[in-house]
Amino acid sequence: MDSTIIASAAINGLLLGGIYTLVACGLTLIYGVLHIINFAHGSMLMLAMFGVYYLLTLLGIDPYLSMFIMVPAMYVLGYLLYKGLIGRLSSGKDENILLVTLGLSILIENLALMFFKGDSRTILVSYSDRMIELGPTLVPLPKLISFVVAMVLCALLGLFMQRTDTGRAIRAVAKERVGARLVGIDVDRIFAISYGIGLATLGAAASLMMPIFYVSPTVGHVFALVAFTVVVLGGMGSFLGAIVGGLIIGLTESFGGLYLGESLGQIGISLIFILILLFRPSGLFGARQ
Amino acid sequence: MNTHRPLSRRLILQAGAASAVLGAPGLLLAQPAPVKVGLVHPVSGGLAYSGGQSRMGAMMAIDEINAAGGIKSMGGAKLQGLLGDSQSRPEIGVSEVERMQQEGVSAYLGCFASGIALPATQAAAKYNTPFLIDVGASDLIVNRGLKNVFRLKPGFGKCVDDAIVALGEINKGANSVAKTAVLVHEESEFGTGTAKLLAGKLPSVGIEVLETIKHANPTRDFSNVALRIKGLKPDIVIMSNYQNEYVLLARTLMQQKVDVAAMFSVLGGGFNFKLVKEQPDVAQYMMDFNHWYNPKNAKAAAMRKQVESKGGLFTFEVYLSYNAIMLYADALQRAGTADKEKAIAALASSTWFPEIMPYGPTRFVNGQNEGGRGALLQASKTDIDVVWPGEFASAKPTFPRPKMS
């Protein structure tokens, strides 16, 4: 096969992986701390994307600038959801949280269907179709921006977890809940903060994705399964894992499409999911149990 | 003297007869029972938008018929739409058919997707209940010998035939500039079936198929597909996909500057007013062979205005569902009853004229209306025009499209 096409597929795969990374970052954080898979992740992403859509169409706020509204808004939503609903209904049991988030996702999706209708929407901004020559291929500017910003945000999130007191407290709770409580950490508050940060990353992801993708009440499904695969591949709770996992999945999808066709090519993602569960259940960078 | 008469059988019968006579005016004034029509549409799940549009069209027709006094030959019987949701899943579509049967449905309308229509019509066939297909392109729907299934609109076999004729004519008019094509289609029955028919028939108008590319639903990125197409350098790209992938693919082809004489589709899922409104640069010059209303018909124009005044879009789902209900109402009027067997016979012998469509009178052969046809459409930055057939055309085709800068 032509080397130009292979190089282009690699670039496309990496750029796609950047988006997957950002969606998976919040999921891995929530798993790392709460030890549950947040089934509402896809529907929250959808909600954030509608937020970006309406900020542009109703108030004329550029999708990238809307990040400064969507990130805090999603954080507050996540914090309040945990404090007011998830935490209360879970009664301290992880499996309850799982069911609550599942119920929440069904509720949000159907409410979205009721209010926004089943229609898909796209946005048009001045730079939507601006192309940048990147090696052998033309890359849409919004895709390049989303990749760069996604990587920067992931690095910032990693730094936050390493260098700040809240980050340390989150890591302490993730590792040893009882111990963290004994040294005076408000574990419930940390749970709520973690859930809030997990959703805040979706606010950023939504702002970066809207100039590229469409939004509909079911758009969460398009990314949720991929995000789960990224988290399993990278290791549940690992940020580095989310970055590497996201890029690997992006490349797998791109090359799978190239060599096996766009229909069969997506089999690669499922294959990785199964192989990782079979041979390295803790993922590439996950802590071994 | 004792005047008391004991209750005899005769007295009871007399009293019964008297009360029946006294009550008769009330009975005579009572409304005939409504005719229940089950609307089996995907109003949630991935196809929710189209399902909602179909439901809107069906309810517009039901409201219009009821407002005009119902079915005259049935004493003004009203139509009642039973609202169903297949959730975009075939098995739920079947369970909705079963549920509505319990509720005494006289006919069904559905199902937008062929994959849902196939098992749903099969389920309705068990009860010999008429099933009107509003949208559902696969010809398998009407080719299985089910006597209860009727499709007013043409299936993809006929659409592909007509699209090939239309493409052949406009290509000939442009000195046969298009000689090669790449087909891109989604992987389900709709896309695969359409692409297979196209690949078989394009050579008949002098167009060679260079490659057929199949993609999954959903596909998140079409960059590689665009690169492959660019490498193949076809004269036209022909797409058959549902809305989301249609828009993503068209956008990616434009971004990657895939310069072709036409981006053409048959029953393109995303070719509609919304594409024109949201992505005018992408939409401009795109061509689609699809179901469309007659732009020269006053009633169609009024319906479009009515839908748009409520913030909706006058998409093909709306008027195809509307027409299917009107067709059923015409059959009921002629049959004078909602009896399933008689309604099926009336539908089979229908010669109804759907005035808002570019159709002739209906003529059903094995449940498929042979009098229907699609139209070749082309988008501008602000609207969609019919460019073929000539008698319904509102504009001339721009073919080949101008080179991308």
Image (cartoon, coloured by chain):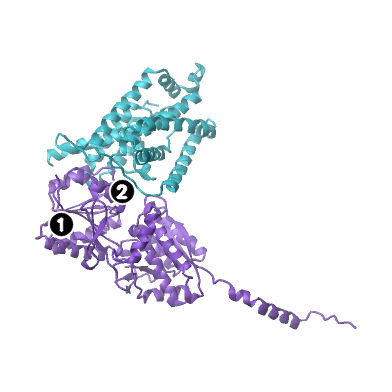
Chain colours: A cyan, B purple
The answer to which of B321 and A95 lies nearer the viewer is: B321
Q: Amino acid at mark 2?
A: Asn
Name the spot of residue B23 as percent of width and height, x first. 66, 76
Name the spot of residue A134 as percent of width and height, x first. 17, 34
Judging from the image, what secondary structure is the residue with disc 2 in? helix
Distance between the alpha carbons at the discs numbered 1 and 2 = 26 Å
Name the spot of residue B106 as percent of width and height, x first. 47, 68
Q: Is residue A9 above or below residue A152?
A: below
The earlier-in-sequence mark between 1 and 2 is 2
Using the rendered image of the protein, determine whether residue A289 is visible from the camera's viewpoint. yes
Task: Specify the quadrant of the image occupied by residue A29.
Answer: top left
The answer to which of A74 and B130 lies nearer the viewer is: A74
Work out whether disc 1 and disc 2 sit on a shared chain: yes
Q: Which mark is residue B399?
A: 1
Quarter that holds the N terminus of chain B: bottom right
Q: Amino acid at mark 1?
A: Phe
- From the image, tell me which residue sits under label 2: B244
In percent of the image, x 20 and y 43: which residue is there? B255
Which label sits in the foreground, 1 or 2? 1
Q: Is residue A204 above or below residue B398?
A: above
Which chain contains the residue that carries disc 1? B
| Left or right side of A188 for B263 | left
Name the spot of residue A200 as percent of width and height, x first. 39, 31
| Left or right side of A131 for A18 | right
Task: Specify the quadrant of the image occupied by residue B178.
Answer: bottom left
The answer to which of B171 and B104 lies nearer the viewer is: B171
Quarter that holds the C terminus of chain B: top left
